[in-house]
Image (cartoon, grey):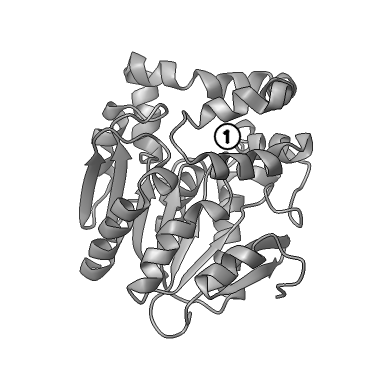
Amino acid sequence: MTSQAHPYADLAARLGGHATTFNTPEGKLTGYTAGDLGASTPVILVHGWPEFASCWEPIASELLKAGHPILAYDQRGYSPGLRPDALEEYTVEKLVNDLAAVADTAGIECFHLVGHDWGGVMGWAAVPHMPHRIQTFTSLASAHTRAHGEMIARDPDQYERMEYLRKIRHHPEQIVTSMLRDDAVKLRAVYQGAIPRHIEDAYVQRLNDPEVLAASLKYYRALGLGMDMPTQPITVPTLYVWGSEDAAFARSSAELTGQYVEGPYEFVELTGRSHWLPEEAPEVVAAHLLKHFARG
């Protein structure tokens, strides 16, 4: 693992940590760590679309102040060292394997898992796959995958909210071109004006490469090629934080999620908050995380 010429060198320094490249069996994932990963249970933070591991900096700062070591990484497709061409390399199973490989590489046996958007989708699948390693799980924005699928079929509102997904799956090349045209105005619109402009600019700068954006869209295109929906119950302590103004996940999916959790469960609705909880409400989210970790 090295921190030379690393995209997270400055961020890691601000946190008093280390920019890191995790050498997994399938490739290299960029990220960062902070705090003593062996002193107490670390928190692994996994981003969604279209974000990077930098989305966690404000939350990571709060967790570190409370004594929780952290690890965050760019998922495959976002990391230049693991950007395969084939769609089947972007299944949820692959994302779960990446999580396990990163933890192994960092020498972490047990951890708290926090995922946003696709990080949450991956997390719902990872928990039943490795409940012995995940001490607690938190999903930000993303409803349980089966609850979401059920509401897409039953709730017209949730179905309409997934129109972007259908467009990505059916017209990926056109979506990439359209999103990056005119200073990426359509890509910027995805963030709903809910995140600070400098963070938005940083995301757009890295996604402005068509190869990177196209790779990030393969997550959606790979749906159905592998294990998308966990079939085993969620048994670890679970926190689900949802913003009432989330444009992707409807209230119906959010409220149904608890039916798929058999372990201790808390649902927190953040009134007036959007999908972009790590960037929009980091202090509030961090406070709920700390309470969750203490209970778990």
Residue that extends furthest to the bottom in the rendered view of this protein: 39
Q: Quadrant of the C terminus?
A: bottom left
Return the residue nearer the eye: 166 or 55: 55
Name the residue located 32 percent from the left edge and 18 percent from the top edge. 155
- Identify the amino acid type marked 1: Leu
State which quadrant residue 202 falls in: top right
Return the residue nearer the eye: 267 or 234: 267
Q: Quadrant of the N terminus?
A: bottom right
Residue 158, given in percent of the width and then of the height, sits at 37, 21
State which quadrant residue 150 falls in: top left
Name the residue located 32 percent from the left edge and 73 percent from the top edge. 66
Left or right placement of residue 41 versus residue 218 in this view:
left
Left or right placement of residue 125 versus residue 294 in this view:
right
Q: Is residue 139 above or below residue 49?
A: below
**Which residue, given by chain and number where applicable, does mark 1 sit on?**
223
Q: Is residue 281 above or below residue 64?
A: above
Q: Is residue 237 above or below residue 280?
A: below
Residue 212 in sight from this viewpoint = yes
Q: How many marks?
A: 1
Q: Assign a secondary structure to mark 1.
A: loop
Residue 20, given in percent of the width and then of the height, sits at 65, 70
Residue 256, given in percent of the width and then of the height, sits at 25, 35
